Image: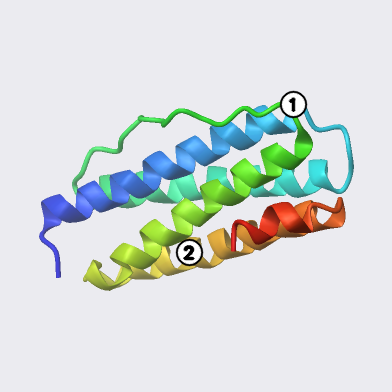
Amino acid sequence: MIDRRHLFDVFNNFLRLARTAKTQYEQHLTNIEREPAQSILADIINEENQHIQWLVTAIQDAGGTPTTEVDEIATPEYFEHMMRADYDMESQIVNEYELHLNEIWDPQLRTLAEVILSQARQHKEAFRGLSEDIGTDEFMEQAS
């Protein structure tokens, strides 16, 4: 179990990752001209927006101050590399949630983390699927 200050740090890290993912995916969406990738990415961006709202509210309700930080984003030129960067982003998010999930003692915050983790796993698989659909199986095997 972690203390309240560490809990804020963990949730601010989750928030920083969600903000980074949203920013990266928005950048990639402006450069993608194919379906279903555009629709899938737009849906994931909407879910990342929801994650940000949930995390900001949770941090504020618990008495913390939400971060506005965003990490550097990956801006590759080719679609396949964008999908790999987005897959890697979701992998990082999944890893962070899995690393800290058992530390979260507050039942509401734990439920929130579990919901976001579940969606991040779905996002990760969506990016894997988009890469496989365009024949980059080899590329994605390296990510497994």
Crowding at label 2, few (<14), some or many (≥20) Cα neighbours within 10 Å? many
Q: Which residue is mark 2?
A: 117
Q: Position of residue 52 (x, y in %)?
A: 46, 44
Q: Is residue 25 above or below residue 96?
A: above
Q: Is residue 79 above or below residue 91?
A: above
Label 1's element? loop
Amino acid under label 2? Leu
Residue under the image location 47 percent in, 60 percent down: 94
Residue under the image location 30 percent in, 51 percent down: 11
Crowding at label 1, few (<14), some or many (≥20) Cα neighbours within 10 Å? few
Determine the CA span between mark 2 and mark 1: 26 Å
Q: Closer to the N terminus: mark 2 or mark 1?
A: 1
Q: Position of residue 4 (x, y in %)?
A: 13, 56
Q: Is residue 119 left or right of residue 16?
A: right
Q: Position of residue 84 (x, y in %)?
A: 65, 46
Q: Which residue is mark 1?
A: 30
Q: Is residue 6 left or right of residue 101?
A: left
For this rendering, which residue is in front, 64 or 67? 67
Residue under the image location 81 percent in, 45 percent down: 37
Q: Where's the C terminus, which quadrant?
A: bottom right
Amino acid under label 1? Thr
Q: Is residue 125 left or right of residue 37?
A: left
Residue under the image location 67 percent in, 61 percent down: 141
Label 2's element? helix
